[in-house]
Image: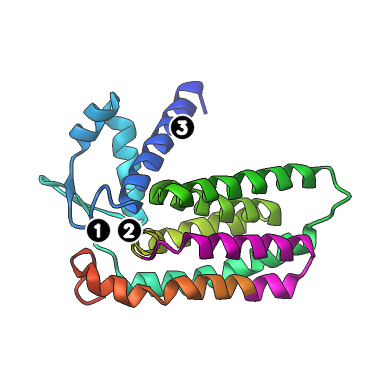
């Protein structure tokens, strides 16, 4: 693979992350039409990396490419949210259990993990103080990603990240509507303590409680934002 190809793929991935974030934080709303040429112009790029990013997001179920018309942001599927949440709970529980089992205070890398987790929690507390939902959501993702890193199973981490994408739009709405940021911070702190105590079973139970508490709001959110969801799924 030559250098140009590597650079192009890296650029396409950066565009993918940019568009993904706009979709998840509802800057691009479900049902909205977006256009390859407009995005390329806004980002100051050629259309090639934009097209590659759009095709990837389409394959993941976030965008619908409509020939001769443009690209529609897909409506949120209630069925997909329910299925993805179930899979996420199962797989992420495995990751948190593994992270707890691998935590070893005698290893030098643990100091880096501790520093990273402290930074993440500080950023969430700062965002909570200012009610900055976008930043708070971002560091919620970073927190869960850090535990996936600590668990050491890259394949498991990649699958969990892909699956939870279909929960993330309603997760963002949950943060926006409930503003239960202090509760989320408390949950994260308890999860960190259980991991550092090597409590594999305890951290898996607490993670399920953490995710289930958020999911209790989803029915109300689906009702309030009915226009964002597919009518029958």
Q: Earlier in the sequence, mark 3 or mark 2?
A: 3
**CB atoms of marks 2 and 1 within 8 Å:** yes
Magenta stretch, residue numbers: 178-205
Which class describes the residues within 10 Å of circle 3: few (<14), some (14-19), or many (20+)? Answer: few
Q: Which residue is mark 3?
A: 10
Q: Secondary structure at mark 2?
A: loop
173 shown above or below 79: above
67 shown above or below 200: above
Q: Earlier in the sequence, mark 2 or mark 1?
A: 2
**CB atoms of marks 3 and 2 within 8 Å:** no
- In the depicted view, which residue is nearer to us: 88 or 56? 88
Nearer the observer: mark 1 or 3; the answer is 1
Which class describes the residues within 10 Å of circle 2: few (<14), some (14-19), or many (20+)? Answer: some
Residue sitting at 37 percent across and 46 percent down? 21
Task: State the separation of the CA atoms marked 1 and 3.
Answer: 25 Å
Q: Quadrant of the C terminus?
A: bottom left
| Residue 68 at x, y percent in the picture | 10, 45
On the rendered structure, is 182 left or right of 114? left
Q: Which residue is mark 1?
A: 74
């Amino acid at each position: 693979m030559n250098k140009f190809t590597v650079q192009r793929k890296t650029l396409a991935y950066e565009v993918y992350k940019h568009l993904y974030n706009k979709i998840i934080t509802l800057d691009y709303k479900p049902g909205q039409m977006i256009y390859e040429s407009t995005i390329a112009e806004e980002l100051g790029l050629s259309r090639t990396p934009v097209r590659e990013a759009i095709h990837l997001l389409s394959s993941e179920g976030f965008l619908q490419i409509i020939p001769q018309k443009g690209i529609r942001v897909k409506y949120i599927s209630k069925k997909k949210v329910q299925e993805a949440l179930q899979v996420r709970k199962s797989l992420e529980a495995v990751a948190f259990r593994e992270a707890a089992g691998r935590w070893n205070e005698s290893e030098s890398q643990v100091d880096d993990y501790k520093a990273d987790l402290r930074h993440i929690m500080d950023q969430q507390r700062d965002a909570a103080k200012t009610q900055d939902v976008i930043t708070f959501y971002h560091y919620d993702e970073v927190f869960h990603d850090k535990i996936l890193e600590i668990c050491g199973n890259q394949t498991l981490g990649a699958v969990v990240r892909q699956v939870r994408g279909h929960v993330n739009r309603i997760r963002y709405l949950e943060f926006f509507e409930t503003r239960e940021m202090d509760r989320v911070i408390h949950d994260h702190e308890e999860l960190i303590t259980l991991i550092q105590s090597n409590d594999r079973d305890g951290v898996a139970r607490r993670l399920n409680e953490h995710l289930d508490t958020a999911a209790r709001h989803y029915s109300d959110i689906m009702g309030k934002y009915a226009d964002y969801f597919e009518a029958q799924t």
